[in-house]
Image (cartoon, helix red, strand yellow):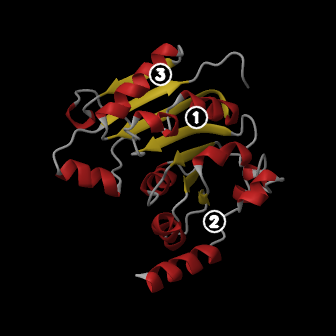
Amino acid sequence: MAKNKLKKFAELASFKHVVQPCIEDLKKSFRYKGKWNKDFFLNSNPIVLELGCGKGEYSVALSKEFPNKNFIGIDIKGSRIWSGAKQAFEDKLTNVGFLRTRIDLIYNCFAINEIDEIWITFPDPQLKRSKSSKRLTHPKFLRMYNNILKSGGRIHLKTDSQFLHGFTLGVISAEKHTLEDATNDLYNSPVKRKHTHIKTFYENLFLSQGMAITYLRFILDYDDLN
C-alpha cells in the first residue's frame, strides 16, 4: 500500500495539470491567483470548481461535456485526485486541472470574481455541532466563495446527507440567498435536471445501499461583499 501511494504521489508531481502548492506559497503570492485563464488553461473560458472533488469524477466528466469551460478539482488528498488526474492525462483533456489544497485556503488560490461556478459533491457533513463551521455550506465558507465567484455564479450541492441538505436550505433562507432548485431525492424526482446524472465513486456506493441523493442549486446574495 505504501509503495502504491508513493508511486501515485510521484506521478502527481509529474502531471503539468496538477498544482500542489505549500502553505507558504499560498500565504505569499500564489503564481496562479488571478491568472488561471492566462497562465494555466491558456484561454479565457469560464472556470468551474469542484470542491472536495475526491477522485475527480465530476471535474473530468463535465470537462468532456463542456469543452468550452475550464474545470478545477480541489481536494487535500493526493491519493484521491490521482485517479481523476490520471484519467484526464490519458484522455488528453486540456480543460481540466487539479489543485491539492484545503478548501479553507481557496481565497489564497483565486482572485476576486475569477470563478464562474462551484460544485460541492458529497462533502463530509460534519454531523457534530462542534464541527458545524467545517461544513462546506456554512456561512463562513459561503462568504469565502462569494469573494471568488462572479456575480450570479451558481453553487451546486450534491449529497447523500439529508442533514447537510436541510442545513444548507436553512442557511440559504436565513441569509436570503437565491434558491433555484432543490430536491431531497434526485433520481426519483419527476424533474429532469442537466448535469446531475454524473455519478461519483461515493455516490454509486450510497445508491447501492438504497440511500437517496439530494441536490441544491443556489446563488449567493451578499451586497456588502465582493
Tell me if 197 is positioned left or right of 185 in this view. right
The residue positioned 43% from the left and 36% from the top of the image is 157
Q: Secondary structure at mark 2?
A: loop
Residues at discs 1 and 3 in contact (Cβ within 8 Å)? no
- Which is in the foreground here, disc 3 or disc 2? 3
Q: Nearer the viewer, residue 103 or 190?
A: 103
**Secondary structure found at label 3:** helix
Q: Which residue is mark 3?
A: 171
Where is residue 136 drawn, in percent x and y?
50, 38
Q: Nearer the viewer, residue 159 or 88?
A: 159
Task: In this rendered view, identify the residue nearer to me: 67 or 198.
Answer: 198
Q: Quadrant of the C terminus?
A: top right
- For marks 3 and 2 on the same chain, the one whose residue lies earlier in the sequence: 2
Marks 2/1 in contact by CB < 8 Å: the verdict is: no
Q: Earlier in the sequence, mark 2 or mark 1?
A: 2
> Residue 118 in the image: x percent, y percent?
54, 39
Identity of the amino acid at label 1?
Phe
The label shown at residue 87 is none
Residue 151: which quarter of the image? top right
Q: Residue at x 21, y 48 (%)?
A: 207
Determine crowd level at label 1: few under 14, some 14-19, many 20+ residues with C-alpha closer than 10 A.
some
Q: Which residue is mark 2?
A: 17
- Towards the viewer: 200 or 134: 134
The spot of residue 177 in percent (x, y) is 53, 18
Secondary element at image label 1? helix
Q: In this image, 83 relative to 11: left or right? A: left
Which residue lies at the image location 63% right of the left edge and 29% below the top edge?
A: 143
Q: Give the residue at mark 1.
A: 141
- Tell me the quarter of the picture where residue 184 sits: top left
Q: Residue farthest to the bottom?
A: 3
